Image (cartoon, grey):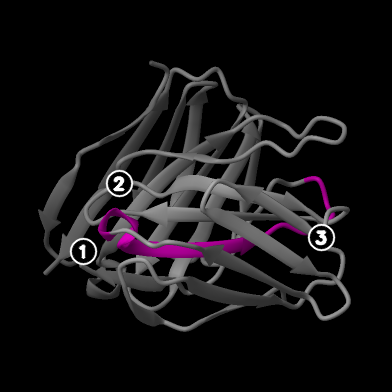
Amino acid sequence: DADVTQTPRNRITKTGKRIMLECSQTKGHDRMYWYRQDPGLGLRLIYYSFDVKDINKGEISDGYSVSRQAQAKFSLSLESAIPNQTALYFCATSEPDRPYSNQPQHFGDGTRLSIL
Amino acid sequence: GENVEQHPSTLSVQEGDSAVIKCTYSDSASNYFPWYKQELGKRPQLIIDIRSNVGEKKDQRIAVTLNKTAKHFSLHITETQPEDSAVYFCAARGSSNTGKLIFGQGTTLQVKP
């Protein structure tokens, strides 16, 4: 089955380290998204990309950067990790909407990141 | 900015009872409203969605209603079962063609056998 795969699934690291979270998809979708999930705050959008030449900031992009290496790959980096970036991170993909048909977002299994 | 408020944050019901989760949104141009279910340790998965030109949509035991005037939409689960226990998220997407979803804070539903 076509899927959205995130690596690593879990990561523990120290303050100040550079971290990269990777997302790859076999769905053939053009659009990709990075979210973080915190208890009581829901899912908040960090960055999104419509294609390899299109990168956009979401609600909470400060402290993060992304790279769209190919249609199928979208990476999230924390240049200098800090403890309040401890969270569950999700990648998602979607197709562009079609007339009279909204295309849902499909999520990966998530990366649980802990920063000490 | 765009905002989605979701209530309640936790909900406990007896098996067989109904459960209702409510969301309000701030952007009157929002035109798409999906609901996601997230089981413990799993990814969010779409369970139902509704477009702004429809007032109600039903899929077996799940239904969603939309009141555009009040900027309010709700998820209704009837005849709840223990496997309905999960965190549920509502979301809204604005009219701009970005695909961006604004999520609610989530509701933890517990169905007691």
Q: Chain of mark 2?
A: A
- Residue type at numbered disc 1: Gly
Choose mark 3 or mark 2, whichever is in front: 3
Do we see residue B76 in this rendering? yes
Residue plotted at (38% across, 15% down): A1
In terms of image quadrants, where is residue A51?
A: top right
Residue plotted at (83% across, 54% down): B54
Q: Chain of mark 1?
A: A
- Pinpoint residue B19: horizontal percent, then vertical percent: 47, 72
In terms of image quadrants, where is residue B90?
A: bottom right
Element type at marker 1?
loop
Left or right: where does residue A88 sit relative to residue A41?
A: left
Element type at marker 2?
loop
- Residue type at numbered disc 3: Gly
- Pinpoint residue B13: horizontal percent, then vertical percent: 34, 77
**From which residue to which does the magenta span run?**
B82-97
- Please say if B26 is above or below A50: below
The quarter of the image holding the N terminus of chain B is bottom right
- Pinpoint residue B112: horizontal percent, then vertical percent: 23, 72
Alpha-carbon distance for marks 1 and 3?
49 Å
Same chain, labels 1 and 3: no
Q: Which residue is mark 2?
A: A110
Q: Which residue is mark 1?
A: A16
Q: Is residue B85 magenta?
A: yes
In terms of image quadrants, where is residue A13?
A: bottom left
The quarter of the image holding the C terminus of chain B is bottom left
Question: Foreground: A18 or A112?
Answer: A112
Question: Foreground: A38 or B49?
Answer: B49
Same chain, labels 3 and 2: no
Alpha-carbon distance for marks 1 and 2?
22 Å
Q: Which residue is mark 3?
A: B55
Left or right: where does residue A6 sit relative to residue A9?
A: right
